Amino acid sequence: MEKRRVVLNSIIIPKQHKQEQDQGAQVVEQVRNKDEDEDLFNIEAELGQQTYNWQDKYRPRKPRYFNRVHTGYEWNKYNQTHYDLDNPPPKVVQGYKFNIFYPDLIDPSKAPTYFIDKDPESPDTVLIRFHAGPPYEDIAFRIVNREWEYSHKKGFRCSFDRGVLSLWFHFKRQFYRK
């Protein structure tokens, strides 16, 4: 296969055998005998079937992604009195990590962005939609509707580097006082 790829990519065209040359000459004579309209039609049909290496690179598609949900225990006063380490409280969502890959952006100078949309099905969740531009389609995820902690010290990160959009965030913790 490797040798075949080298031959296909080479500019030099190898010499044809005598039999192939005779067949080629016959094809040329048949083309000359045809009407000009029919010949043009065949050329146009052949051009329509041509494929290019970059066609797959720029066709519209969804980006690849790698997501994590950060869950853990919330040790508020109620859970401290009713649960212990042997019998822990139910886990709650504490944050998310989104890594979305955009290797073939047409304009890599424009960074992808995210939008928060209300979820029509549930008030407890929202839709986070990522938009990057061509050739990538928008992609959306349903997440918990809570207030985010935007402090870098608390784990917020939103960066676009080497074709990867990283959005990491944790939710604000709510402390209750009497």
Image: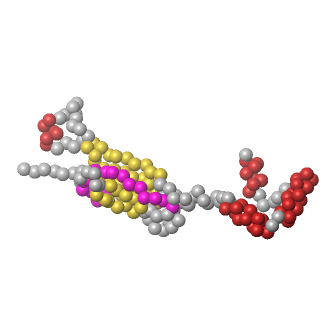
Which residue reaches farthest top? 86
Residue drawn 16% across and 39% down?
A: 79
The extreme right residue here reads 18
Q: Position of residue 100 (x, y in %)?
A: 44, 54
Residue 81 in sight in this render? yes
Vertical placement of residue 175 versus 161, above or below: above
- Residue 54 location, quadrant: bottom right
Looking at the picture, does residue 56 appear above or below residue 40? above
Q: Which residue is nearer to you in this view: 99 or 37? A: 37
**16 left or right of 55?**
right
- Judge left or right: residue 154 versus residue 55: left
For the point 91% across and 55% down, the residue is: 22
Q: Position of residue 146 (x, y in %)?
A: 24, 53
* In-image side of 58 versus 6 (left or right): left
Residue at the extreme left: 178
Number of labels in the image equals 0
Q: Main secondary structure of the magenta part?
A: loop
- Residue in the foreground of this view, choosing between 105 and 154: 105
Q: Nearer the viewer, residue 138 or 76?
A: 138
Give the colouring mode of the picture: secondary structure
Q: Nearer the viewer, residue 98 or 159?
A: 98
Evaluate whether residue 28 shows in this view: no
Residue 165, how many percent across, how many down? Answer: 43, 58
- Please report the residue visible at 76 percent of the width from the left and 68 percent of the height from the top: 37
Residue at 89 percent across and 59 percent down: it is: 25
Instruction: Please tell me whether residue 57 belongs to the stretch shown in magenta.
Output: no
Q: Which residues are magenta?
A: 135-156
Position of residue 8 measured from the top left corner of the image (x, y, whole percent): 75, 54
